[in-house]
Image: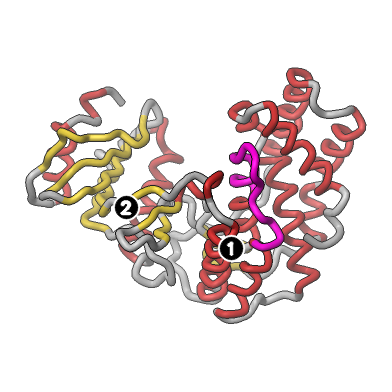
Amino acid sequence: MGERDRGEPAIRDAMHRLGVAGEVDAGGLRVLAGGMSGSVVCRFTLDGRDVVLKRTVAGHRNAVLLARARREVWFYRELAGRVPVRVPAMIGSAIDPEAGTLLLLAACDPAPPPESWPDAGYAEVARDLGRFHAAMRGVPLPAWMPSASATTPGQRRDAAESWRTFVETTRLIPDGLHRRMEETIARVAELDAAIPAGPATLCHGDFHAGNLLRDADGRWVWADWQDSRIGPGVDDLAFLWERAFSAVEARLPPFDAMVEAYWAGLAEAGGPGMDRVAFGRALAWSELRGWLIAWPPYLGYLSRAQQERVVARIAWRLDRVDGTA
């Protein structure tokens, strides 16, 4: 996508497709995300109020991206009013096989970076997450909502190769630890079967501080639902922790407080659906599997100190994967 695809003419064209009338003021236009992927997110003013437009073009190279964009549109159309959390208000949406998708939302302010969150902020979000998962467990969901998929042999091979490259370029992982990591990656399918993940529920799928916003009253608003899926709730909690843990430079997020708050949230909205020991094992394994399989491509974006911290956390988790969180 070039500048013409994210400027005022593109916005006016999108408003026409959406059937949304109003005065567009693109003078303060801000592109929040977008590029060669085929998706652009921009913020501008419509009739004096701030809005966010998410635009994804159709095309054979954008098949996965387009599927995720359609899922988010469907979420706002069919599920946004049923989930027990605040989400951005949808103003309009369109799905076109030829032109792609459009999603126009009321804008909210981004949450502060995790580094500045008080411990109570982490606990509040974790508690809300527990309530959400317990409340949505067993709720009939549309056929278009996918289930979380198991890691594939190809993903495991790619992860192992990425870790080898990381070891060679950084020299941060001792040989003994690297062997244990490779052995665990080879056993992912076995451990998935041996460690029950807990009851399935609606998961956000990309739950981290960057996807949490604030409304005018300072309340949390959950955004970016394109990766929503049916799966074990511990995956959302583990990812929230991983992203915060890897992002901060000094003060670490309060893991134990987050776990206790999440457990309390589950209890408040229908119960955990599993005992505490099983929950601890499921969370421990979800976190370790995430570090080993999903994280290698993103380690290069971390500082040396952050990389060292992640490696130390993996070593610590490897010793406890068969225990509790």
Labels 2 and 1: the sequence-earlier one: 2
Q: CA distance from mark 2 to mark 1?
A: 22 Å
In which quadrant will I find the C terminus? Answer: bottom right
- Element under disc 1: helix
Would you call the spot at circle 1 few (<14 residues within 10 Å), some (14-19), or many (20 or more)?
many
Query: In screen coordinates, is 158 left or right of 186?
Result: left
Residue located at (73% from left, 47% from top): 289
* Residue 4 % position (x, y): 21, 25
Residue 70 can be seen in this image: yes
Name the amino acid type tagged 2: Cys
- Element under disc 2: loop
Name the amino acid type tagged 1: Ala
Q: In the depicted view, which residue is nearer to us: 59 or 209?
A: 209
Eye-nearest disc, 2 or 1: 1
The answer to which image quadrant residue 26 occupies is top left
The magenta span reads 242-257
Identify whether 235 is placed above or below 37: below
Q: How is the image coloured?
A: secondary structure
In which quadrant will I find the N terminus? Answer: top left
Q: Is residue 254 magenta?
A: yes
Q: Looking at the rendered structure, which numbered label has been put on residue 123?
A: 1
Query: In screen coordinates, is 38 left or right of 151?
Result: left
Residue 158 can be seen in this image: no
Q: Kindly identify which residue carries mark 2.
A: 108
